[in-house]
Image (cartoon, grey):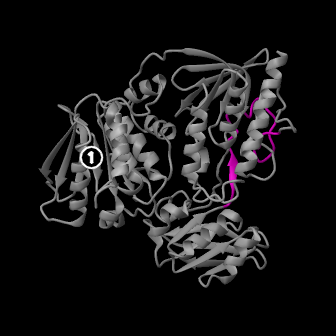
């Protein structure tokens, strides 16, 4: 089916920037199929949009359908095995831009780190075209392939490689293999992927070039709180920077948002895009794909040291790094991650069609996950540690009417069991009777809350036993010149709308201090 003309026009406008010849090869299996027809139409239609794109066809040597991209005269290092439609259409559109140097590429320090990786490196990403988390991984590796002279990335559509997915025991997307071995599972940004590559591969030794930048305000974190803080300080005329592994933050992992006032419904990735657009409307330096390695202080001024030699100096530092999924830390959890243990019901739910699964956690996230999965799975068991489910009543009412959901309260999950390849069951303890019970099931979705991302700054500010940064009503921490906002702080009720307001408060507090300095 042809792409809509309006979409083709958008792609054409984006590809105007391409200023070198890019070869796109359609590698065809001998047997015809609807997928082959779809791929041929996609490549023919899109390569006609730019004079810089060269369309070629070749016969597949192993029977797999592939779309391969590379600079003219060089090897084709970005490969789509399958048809990059759905959420991966964007990855396909961005690939020629990356190869021509016109995609949103990393900063100089990150570029140096990528080029220092010793090749050859072969990465394979197994994805679902309906997965909203997969494109982040695919695009990160495509960008690395465009930068590194000996790095090849292949995206494989799991729907067209079901036998291979089963053989490898893959039940979660995205799943990444490095040189044929398991490497990463779940949503990852370039920062975390690059760190894992550096920890796994040999790295060329090189002199780190130190670069110092000075700002009135540095915001660490690019989610709702961080974006709000940066916008407010920029509007006040302060020289502002955002350091973020991924602008949009955990919002990108939220399927549907129905309680952001004035916006009855929006999907998380859409909100993340709007946050980015709003930030881009102001003179804010965005230092993306970076983590703060260390913070030092001198005379109430803060210095943030980033990997690759970049140092940021500021009198006002705002911590807005949010939180991450809390893990159970029980036997079997890490061993079967991606092979029956999952965190994202939207991405991984289809792997458990007509199967029995469990959701650990009876709060809003857990109950929402159970309701979503109930439409796919044969049966869903909610296991809640406490004496009652803690979700909103509107969600509990839906659970009551669902025929294939049951809830176990006062249940302590002890172990995730498997056959060495995939999950086969779960053992929990009935806290009322201390009796241990085993459930036979195919998957476990963990939804037990969040852990604040505060370790990078915890040496300089007071935190609670849970790791939350302690703040007052003006978002001041225990240390002058350091503020915190959003889920990383002690502010009650971890909601997007609250994080935005707290970010604004932190920005105004930083401006107030700046006026007095």
Q: Residue at x 67, y 34 (%)?
A: 456
Asked if residue 471 lies left or right of residue 145, the reply is right
- Residue 119, compared with residue 163, is above or below; it is above
Q: How many marks?
A: 1
For label 1, the SS is helix
What is the x, y in percent for residue 237? 70, 21
Residue 33 occupies quadrant: bottom left
Q: Residue at x 76, y 42 (%)?
A: 501
Determine whether 251 is above or below 401 in the image. above
* Closer to us: 8 or 462: 8
Q: Which residue is mark 1?
A: 46
Q: Residues in magenta? A: 448-470
Occupied quadrant, residue 150: top left
For this orientation, the residue located farthest to the bottom is 403
> Could you tell whether 469 is left or right of 447 in the image?
right
Specify whether 146 is left or right of 487: left
């Amino acid at each position: 089916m042809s792409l809509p003309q309006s979409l083709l026009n958008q792609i054409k406008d984006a590809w105007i920037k391409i200023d070198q010849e890019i070869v796109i090869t359609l590698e065809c299996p001998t047997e015809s199929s609807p997928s082959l027809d779809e791929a041929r139409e996609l490549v023919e239609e899109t390569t006609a949009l730019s004079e810089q794109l060269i369309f070629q066809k070749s016969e597949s040597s192993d029977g797999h359908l592939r779309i391969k991209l590379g600079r003219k005269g060089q090897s084709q290092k970005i490969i789509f095995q399958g048809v990059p439609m759905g959420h991966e259409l964007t990855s396909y559109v961005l690939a020629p831009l990356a190869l021509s140097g016109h995609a949103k590429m990393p900063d100089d320090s990150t570029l140096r780190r990528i080029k220092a990786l010793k090749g050859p490196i072969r990465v394979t990403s197994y994805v679902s075209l309906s997965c909203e988390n997969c494109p982040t991984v695919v695009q990160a590796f495509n960008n690395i392939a465009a930068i590194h002279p000996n790095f090849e990335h292949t995206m494989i559509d799991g729907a067209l490689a079901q036998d291979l997915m089963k053989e490898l025991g893959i039940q979660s997307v995205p799943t990444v293999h490095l040189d044929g071995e398991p490497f990463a599972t779940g949503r990852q940004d370039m920062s975390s992927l690059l760190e894992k590559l550096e920890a796994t591969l040999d790295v060329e030794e090189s002199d780190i070039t130190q670069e110092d930048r000075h700002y009135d305000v540095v915001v660490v974190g690019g989610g709702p709180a961080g974006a709000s803080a940066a916008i407010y300080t920029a509007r006040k005329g302060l020289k502002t920077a955002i350091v973020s592994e991924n602008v949009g933050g955990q919002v990108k992992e939220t399927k549907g948002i129905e309680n952001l006032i004035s916006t009855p419904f929006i999907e998380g990735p859409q909100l993340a895009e709007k946050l980015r657009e709003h930030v881009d409307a102001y003179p804010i330096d965005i230092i993306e794909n970076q983590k703060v390695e260390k913070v030092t202080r001198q005379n109430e001024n803060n210095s943030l040291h980033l990997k690759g030699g970049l140092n940021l100096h500021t009198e006002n530092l705002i911590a807005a790094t949010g939180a991450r999924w809390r893990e159970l830390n029980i036997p079997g959890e890490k061993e079967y991650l991606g092979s029956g243990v999952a965190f994202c019901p939207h991405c991984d739910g289809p792997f458990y069609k007509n199967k029995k699964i469990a959701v650990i956690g009876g709060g809003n996230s857990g109950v929402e996950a159970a309701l979503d999965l109930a439409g796919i799975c044969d049966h869903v068991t909610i296991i809640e540690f406490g004496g009652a489910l803690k979700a909103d009543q509107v969600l509990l009412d839906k659970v009551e009417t669902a025929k294939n959901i049951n809830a176990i309260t006062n249940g302590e999950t002890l172990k995730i069991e498997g056959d060495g390849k995939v999950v086969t069951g779960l053992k929990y303890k009935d806290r009322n009777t201390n009796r241990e019970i085993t459930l036979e099931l195919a998957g476990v979705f963990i939804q037990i809350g969040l852990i604040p991302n505060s370790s990078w700054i915890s040496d300089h500010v007071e935190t609670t036993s849970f790791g939350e940064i302690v703040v007052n009503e003006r978002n001041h921490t225990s240390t002058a010149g350091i503020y915190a906002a959003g889920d990383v702080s002690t502010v009650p009720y971890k909601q997007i709308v609250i994080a935005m307001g707290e970010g604004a408060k932190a920005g105004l507090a930083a401006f107030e201090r700046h006026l007095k300095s």
